Amino acid sequence: MKETDKIAGFALILLMLLMPSACSDDFLDKPLQGELTQEFFPSNANDAFLATNAVYNTLRNWFYNYGGYPIYDIMSDDALKGSNPSDGAATIGPYEDFSFNTNADGLERWWNTLYEGIKRTNVVIEKVPEISMNADLKARYIAEAKFFRALFYFDLVTAWGGGPIITSTEPPTIVDRATREEVNALIEADLTEAIENLPTKNEYGPNELGRATRDAAKALLGKVFLYQNNFTQAETYFLEVINSGLYALDTDFIRTHSEEGEFNAESVFEVNAIPLDGTVNGGSQWGNVQGVRGNPNRGWGFNRPSLDLINAFQQNQDPRLEGTVIFLGDEIDGIPIVGDSQTPDEVRDENDNLIEIESYNRKVWVTGTRVVEQWGHNRRIIRYADVLLMAAEASAQNNNIPQALNFLNEVRRRARGNNPDVLPDITETNPAMLLESIYDERRFELALEGHRYPDLIRTGKAVEVLGAQGFTPGKHELLPIPQVEIDLTEGRMQQNPGWN
């Protein structure tokens, strides 16, 4: 079992606190001693620790991952539903061709989990300041909570646009939907305050791996500005991460996604998980959902790499294909990949054109032959390679071409490894053409990590790339607000454009 920072499992303690005790004769005459209430919890330093760790456990909730499935990849040109043909065909399949609706599977789960995480952050932000405890630790816990509140709201604003802003443990019964600009303002304020009090990566001890850092907050804030086309501010924060000297690309692309690569120099922020079944035990189902189906039985096999992605790697002679796609017949860690007997090795259209092959996401591979090992995969939320490419993009937009080329080619040099005949340095100085190279590089470097669909939306390329797949401009830039949320407000919350 790998080392963990002891964040895992504290949610179980928190759940135990929720269970009422009935061992006293005058039980009904006292406040519930074991019940977690806004009045009595958190009330001391240990409570503050538990409340902060409960925020982290939101990330291991299966529903935090886009409602349970990698729909951002499935909606892009990088992946298909996966699994066997019938599994999830009616629920996850519609994300492939944009035929999903306001009651689509997973949307309500994702929305609710983000707000559950926001609620947990509000407990820390509102209640921990009242606790008598070490001032530096108190400030750190509050900063961690603000980082996560910003992360949850960034997920929400990217997927749905504006949403209700909840910053209190006792919100009003009726909360109007805030605009995208108002939500972004909260995100920026939270991250700015978090940066002031979060430690740097090297200031944490070995038992605290996976906790939020100052540079994680800076990288996320840079991304927030990038998504708003505020390239000057974005570049500023990315450069602060890069110039910190605390991060570097792993020399081995495959290793950086493996168990061996957890919390390495390339890790800016990742979700710590251990190979135990169940979120309360410290496991995360992200890898299980996408693990090889059949033999070896590593999971459900969703998020199958598309032929379009595979062909793009091959045409580019990009060595990262091996670290991105598992093919039938591969042998990994001495384990042969046989695949699923209920899944066709190949799928062809009516004209006998090959349109799909059985393959899997290599980036979630965890050594072993049982499903439970997949629960120990750490989902990488922010990698240094992503920071470099976002910095390259912001620099190119700001007409700082030499700097953009430097960051872009740093990623390409790692990718080509010891083969000088592939992936030569980019020398393009035309800003528009350079940006195209950066966008392409993001696809190859970050494939199957959930970046492709938002990238296509924010760069205005979704219609060109996904139009034939079913993408409708003016509609699919945002997901539909879950219909149940519209119904609960009796229509007070307005649906996103195109979804009525």
Image (tube, grey):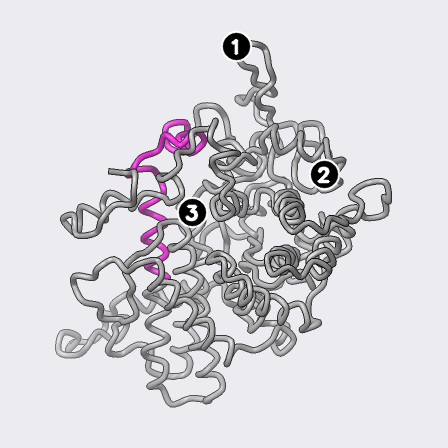
Q: Is residue 337 left or right of residue 155?
A: right
Between disc 1 and disc 3, the foreground one is 1
Q: What is the spatial separation of the Cα atoms under label 3 and label 2, in whole angstroms?
A: 26 Å
What is the x, y in percent for residue 230? Answer: 50, 62
Q: For the N terminus, give its image quadrant.
A: bottom right
What is the x, y in percent for residue 466? Answer: 49, 33
Q: For the C terminus, give its image quadrant.
A: top left
Q: Residue at x 77, y 55 (%)?
A: 251
Crowd band around label 1 with a 10 angstrom C-alpha radius: few (<14), some (14–19), many (20+)? few
Q: Nearer the viewer, residue 57 or 407?
A: 407
Q: Report the magenta residues as a range.
A: 88-117
Task: Say whether disc 2 or disc 1 marks the residue closer to the N-terminus.
Answer: 2
Residue at numbered disc 2: 322
Would residue 116 be counted in the magenta stretch? yes
What is the x, y in percent for residue 51? Answer: 39, 72
Q: Is residue 178 left or right of residue 134?
A: left
Amino acid on which disc 3 is placed? Tyr
Q: Is residue 57 left or right of residue 455?
A: left
Amino acid on which disc 2 is placed? Glu
What is the x, y in percent for residue 464? Answer: 51, 34
Q: Residue at x 33, y 86 (%)?
A: 130
Amino acid on which disc 1 is placed? Glu
Helix, strand or loop status at disc 3: helix
> How many badges with numbers are in the image?
3
